Amino acid sequence: MSPDVPLSAAQLFDTLGVDYERAYAELPEQHAALDWLRGRLRAGARVLDVGSGTGIPTARILSDSGFRVEGIDVSPVMIELARQRVPAATFHRADVREFSAEPASFDAICAFFPLLQMPRADIDAALVRIATWLRPGGYLVAATVPVDAEQADIVFMGHPARVSSYAAADFVARLGDAGLEVVEARESTFRPDHEDALPEPHLFVYCRRPD
């Protein structure tokens, strides 16, 4: 494959593997979101991690906290790493656009940057699907890079990729359109721990599915 051809999400994260884990393991706002979530869930709550990567830190923290964790990711390399690192959780190789879950079957869902490598129409549809998987009163903690972009070609950690996203206010609005109550939205900047990484704007949004 030409070095200039954007990699699919599966190809990109197969290539990055543990480098991605190292680059983002100490992301402060992600840990803050997980703390917020843990403080609101009952013991044994069922949690889905969309775009679970290697399982570090999200699935491990939630599993170690006594929650029943499932993770999905499009990358077979990431899924294998996650199964090794977080054996108490269950991981599936699956795309959020195709993953099948019963309505109202999860107490909480984490979605930290899993929708960036898809067109905006797919982002919108995925948010609606995710919202239906939450039980009434359940929580979603989600993160994206808040930029106004539709299928833009970039270089991510040294590799070509194609991404879409929304400006912060537009992403928050789409969560509302999906039927979620936005409790809080936090914007920040983070530089991943990788030689080819650049500082990134981040948006973390805490949501609740109304009763």
Image (cartoon, rainbow, N blue to C red):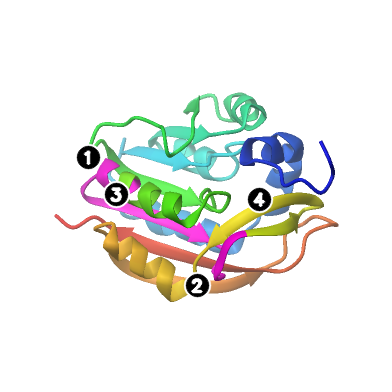
Lower sequence index among marks 3 and 1: 1
The residue carrying mark 3 is 131
Horizontal relation, residue 129 to residue 202: left or right: left
Kind of element beneath mark 1: loop
**Residue 60: percent from left, percent from top:** 53, 38
**Left or right: 105 with respect to 157?**
left
Q: Over which residues does the magenta segment extend? A: 130-151
> In front here: 16 or 64?
16
Q: Nearer the viewer, mark 1 or mark 2?
A: 2
The residue that label 4 is drawn on is 25
Secondary structure of the residue carrying numbered label 3? helix
For the residues labelled 2 and 4, the Cα–Cα distance comes to: 25 Å
Residue for badge 1: 104
Q: Which mark is residue 167?
A: 2
Instruction: Name which of mark 2 and mark 4 comes first in the sequence.
Output: 4
The part of the image, by quadrant, that contains residue 107 is top left
Badge 2 element:
loop
Depth check: give the residue in front, 91 or 15: 15
- Above or below 153: residue 52: above
Marks 3 and 4, Cα distance to the nearest angstrom?
Answer: 26 Å
